[in-house]
Amino acid sequence: MEFRPSARSEQFRARVAAFVQEHVLPLEARLLREHDRAPHSADWRTWRVRPEVEALKEKARAEGLWNLFLHDEKLGAGLTTLEYAPVAEEMGKSLLAPEVFNCNAPDTGNMEVLWQHGTEEQKARWLAPLLEGRIRSGFCMTEPDVASSDATNVRASARIEGDEVVLNGTKWWTTGLGHPQCAFVIFMGLTDEAAPRHARHSMVLVPLDAKGVTIERMMPVFGEFDEPYGHGEVSFRDVRLPLSSLIGGPGMGFAIAQERLGPGRIHHCMRCIGGAERALQLMVERGLSREAFGKPLVNLGGNRERIADLRVAIDQARLLTLYAAWKLDEEGPLGAMQEVSAIKLVAPSVLQRAADAAIQMHGGVGLSHDVPLTAFYAYARVLRIADGPDEVHRGLIARLELAKYRRGGDA
Ligand SMILES: Cc1cc2nc3c(=O)[nH]c(=O)nc-3n(C[C@H](O)[C@H](O)[C@H](O)COP(=O)(O)OP(=O)(O)OC[C@H]3O[C@@H](n4cnc5c(N)ncnc54)[C@H](O)[C@@H]3O)c2cc1C
C-alpha cells in the first residue's frame, strides 16, 4: 500500500486540524465547564440543541468541511477511506468535533446505507436532510432480551402483511434517540424465520412519530447521558408502515448491516487514534509543567516508559488503521473483515490505555470535567462492547485465520 497521504487528504486534514484547534477545542472546554453547573436530567424531552454548536456546524459547512466521510464526489468530498483516515483522526481529538463536521455516528452509517441502498424517494425524504444536518437519526439493532453481539439473535419482528410491514419489539442503546432533531431510526427486524440465517432480517425506515413507537428511557454510560444525543430504549407496538419503508427489500437486513458496520467501525478507530494523541499530549504537557518531589512529574517513577509505550502503541494502531482503510477501499467490507476486526480490537484499547495514563498523570483533576479525559475513557470503554465486543472480533479474526489452513474453506 501507498503510505504517503494524497494531496487532497493532507489538505483536508490540515484544514480540519486548524478548525478543531481554533473553534472546537475552546467551545469544548466551555461546554465541559458548564456541564458541571447546568442541571442534568434523564428526561430527554428537556434536552436542547446548543446554538453555539449549530453555529459552528454552519461555519464548517460554509468552509466545505462537511460530510467528508462520504465517498460521493458531489455529496461529500470524494475521499477514499484511506484518504479520510487522517482527517477523521483530527476530528477524534475532540468528542464534539465529528458532529460539527456532520461526520458523527450513527448518522454517518445511516447516510451510507441510504446513499448505497435507498430508493430515490427514501433519499429525498431522509438522506437529503441528514446530509444538510437538519435532522438526526438512530440505528436500532440491539435488544434487551437477546445477546445482540450475535446479530442473528435479533428477534424484534418486521412482518410483511399485504402492502405493509408491521414492527413489534423493544430495542435499546439506540444512540441519538434523545436528540431533539432525531426524526427517524433504521430498525432491524426478523421477517422470515424459515429463511437461511443471514436472510431472515430486514431493515426498515421508521419515522420517530409513527404510531406505536414509544421512547421508554435514556440509558446512562458511567452516569452520563451524552445529551443531546443519548442512548435510548424504544418500543415498537404494531407499527404499520408502507412496504416502501424497507431498505433494499425483505431479508436484506444482514447483508446491509455487514456493509454498514465495516466503514462505521473503522471511522470509530480513526477517531480513537486522534483521541489517544490528544490524551498523550495532555499527559505530557501536564507532566512537564508540574513538579513533585523536586522533579517534573514526567521524570518520576515509570512515567517516561509509559509515555514511550503509548507513543509506540498509537503509531502501531495508526498503521493498522491505515492498512484496514486501504483494504476496505481495495476489497470492500467483506474483503477487509479481518483487518477491520483487528483494528476494532486494537484502537479502542489504545485509547483506553492513553486516557487512563493521562488521568493518572493529572491526579485528581484528571477525573473532573476540567479536562476531557473521562469522556475519552468512556468512549473507548463503550467501543470495546459496541459494534461488536472485543471477543467477537477476536473470534472472527481467528476463524478467518484458521480457514486459511483448512482445506475446503471456512473453519
Ligand atoms: C453507549 C452505547 C451505544 C450503543 N449504540 C448502539 C446503537 O446506536 N445501536 C445499536 O443497535 N446498538 C448500540 N449499542 C449496543 C451494542 O452494540 C451492544 O451492546 C453490543 O453489540 C453487545 O450486545 P449485548 O449488549 O447484547 O451484549 P451480549 O451479546 O449479551 O454480550 C455480553 C458479553 O458476552 C461476551 N461475548 C459475546 N460474544 C462472545 C464471543 N463470541 N466470545 C466470547 N465472549 C463473548 C462479551 O464479553 C460481551 O461483552 C450501544 C452500546 C453502548 C454501550
Image (cartoon, rainbow, N blue to C red):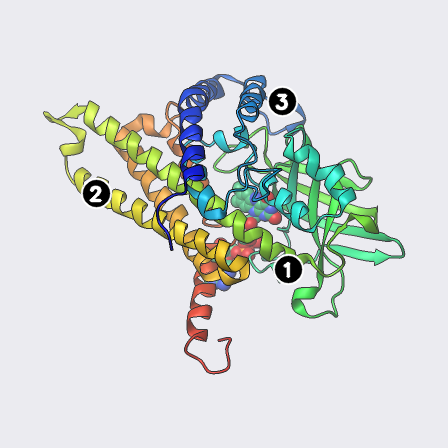
Disc 2 target residue: 308
The kind of residue tagged 1 is: Ala
Q: How far apart are marks 1 and 2 (CA)?
A: 42 Å
**Residue shown at 48%/76% (left/top)?**
411
Instruction: Please state the horizontal and vertical placement of residue 15, each as a whole percent of the image.
Output: 43, 28
Contact flag, marks 1 and 3 (Cβ < 8 Å):
no
Dot 3 surroundings within 10 Å: few (below 14), some, or many (20 or more)?
A: some
Residue 27 vertical placement versus 391 (above, below)? above
Contact flag, marks 1 and 2 (Cβ < 8 Å):
no
Mark 3 C-beta closer than 8 Å to ligand 1: no
Please give left or right for residue 110 compared with residue 11 in the image. right
Precedes in sequence: disc 1 or disc 3: 3
Instruction: Please state the horizontal and vertical placement of residue 190, each as a whole percent of the image.
Output: 72, 59
Precedes in sequence: disc 1 or disc 2: 1
Disc 3 target residue: 48
The kind of residue tagged 3 is: Arg
- SS at circle 1: helix
Residue 255: which disc?
A: 1
**Residue shown at 78%/43% (left/top)?**
121
